[in-house]
Image (tube, helix red, strand yellow):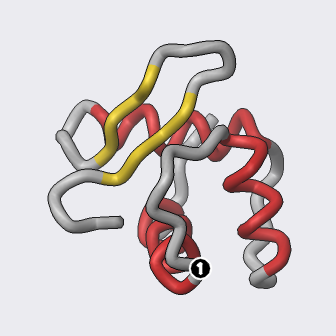
Amino acid sequence: MRIRRGDFERIRSVLEKADADQPMTAREILELLDEHGEEFDSAHRVATVLGRQAQTGAVEVIRDQPYRYRFLDGHN
């Protein structure tokens, strides 16, 4: 699965607009994206984008059941 440029920014922008400050699951994020008119293929795609950003330190992956994602460094 190829990550399109800007996917992370689109996710971050919607979460900032929604003032989502609590960790969220990929499915919850996908639902929020949909409510704001941003199309993503699946919760798996959201998780993939955020998982890759976790490697840079922009996102924390909370390895619970289900995984939850939290933006770091003032990203939300």
Q: Amino acid at mark 1?
A: Ala
Residue 63 lies, in percent from the top left, at 48, 15
For label 1, the crowd category at 10 Å Cα-Cα, with few meaning under 14, some 14 to 19 and many 20 or more, is few
Residue 42 against residue 74 in the figure, above or below = above
Determine the residue positioned at 28% across, 66% down: 75
Determine the residue positioned at 16% across, 58% down: 73
Residue 38 against residue 63 in the figure, above or below = below
**Left or right of 49, for residue 25:** right
Residue 8 lies, in percent from the top left, at 45, 61
Q: Quadrant of residue 56?
A: top left
Determine the residue positioned at 74% across, 67% down: 32
Image quarter where the C terminus lies is bottom left
Determine the residue positioned at 43% across, 71% down: 9
Look at the numbered disc 1 and give the secondary structure of its residue: loop
Residue 40 against residue 35 in the figure, above or below = above
Residue 52 lies, in percent from the top left, at 38, 36
Residue 24 lies, in percent from the top left, at 59, 45
Q: Quadrant of residue 61?
A: top left
User: What residue sits right under mark 1 in the picture?
Assistant: 18
Q: Quadrant of residue 64?
A: top right
Instruction: Tell which residue pokes out farthest to the front in this image.
Output: 22
**Left or right of 62, for residue 48:** right
Residue 31 against residue 42 in the figure, above or below = below
